[in-house]
Amino acid sequence: MPEPQPRPDGRRWDELRPVKITRSYLKNVEGSVLIEMGDTKVICAVTVEESVPPFLRGKNKGWISAEYGMLPRSSHERIARESVRGRIGGRTHEIQRLIGRSLRAVTDLDRLGERTLWIDCDVIQADGGTRTASITGAFVALADALLHAQKQGRIDRFPIRDYLAAVSVGRVRGRPLLDLCYAEDSAAEVDMNVVMTGSEKFVEVQGTAEQEPFTRSEMDALMVLGKKGIQQLVARQTKLLKGLPLCGP
């Protein structure tokens, strides 16, 4: 039986890319980070706005909304700005909704009061896993923004219930792999994005057979791999945010 081909960056099949999260990356916003996962780099910024969408007015409840975009030269070829095209693409809409849903899942919106948290995720360099890196980085930026708002007296009770991170997994040339780079993602027979909490509960699983259908046992193996990666990412977040006053379920 032939030896499996090495990964493009030499990692083990179950190894994350090098992860670096730089807090307070931007000057003029309540919370921000630069997250780097290998060659993927995303700036995540969180703004606390003293208003809510019309459907929540008068309900003393907050909201979290996300925007996501890729800079024109974040990839190998220039990507036209969606503002120039005059419309937001389907992929962007999908990722924005995913980021918003994921962060709402670990936030007690009643504790926010009538405030909106705007999550802006801008990909400055893309090498696979931009949506999962956005979620992992945005969680840290969200926590920092809420700590800042609490220090200012804008909120009196910290509203985050649990940690949150995301990672990609996939089957490439018959092998399960953790944290796919672009070369692996573009060749994957199965591609999945897994979002989980620090207490190991699933928030979302997006799984697609790109070429051939996959079995339940293959899916289970990928879930175990995703869980391992997310545990490591949450450990990194916990080290950065030590003493985060989680409000519990």
Image (cartoon, rainbow, N blue to C red):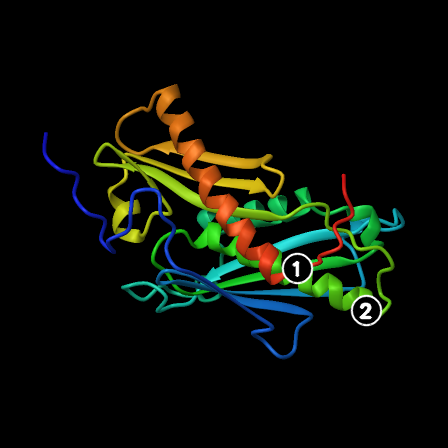
Q: Nearer the viewer, residue 161 or 63?
A: 161
| Res 55 seen here | no
| N-term mark: 2 or 1 | 2
Q: Residue, x 78% and y 47% (percent of image)?
A: 247
Q: Answer few, some or many: residues within 10 Å of disc 1's Cα (few below 14, many 20 plus, some between 14 and 19).
A: few
Q: Name the mark on residue 146.
A: none
Q: Amino acid at mark 2?
A: Lys
Q: Nearer the viewer, mark 2 or mark 1?
A: 1
Q: Answer few, some or many: residues within 10 Å of disc 2's Cα (few below 14, many 20 plus, some between 14 and 19).
A: few
Q: Quadrant of residue 171?
A: top left
Q: Circle 1 is placed at which residue position? A: 242
User: How far from the left and from the top, in percent, is residue 216?
Assistant: 39, 20
Q: Amino acid at mark 1?
A: Lys
Q: Residue, x 35% and y 25% (percent of image)?
A: 218
Dot 2 and dot 1 residues touching (CB under 8 Å): no
Residue extending farthest bottom: 27
User: How far from the left and from the top, in percent, is residue 155?
Assistant: 84, 61
| Res 4 seen here | yes
User: How far from the left and from the top, in percent, is residue 151?
Assistant: 81, 69
Q: Mark 2 falls on what kind of element?
A: helix
Q: Circle 2 is placed at which residue position? A: 151
Which image quarter holds the N terminus? top left
Tell me: 74 left or right of 63. left
Tell me: 178 left or right of 167. left
Tell me: 73 left or right of 157. left
- Residue at mark 2 to residue at mark 1: CA–CA distance: 17 Å
Q: Residue, x 87% and y 67% (percent of image)?
A: 153
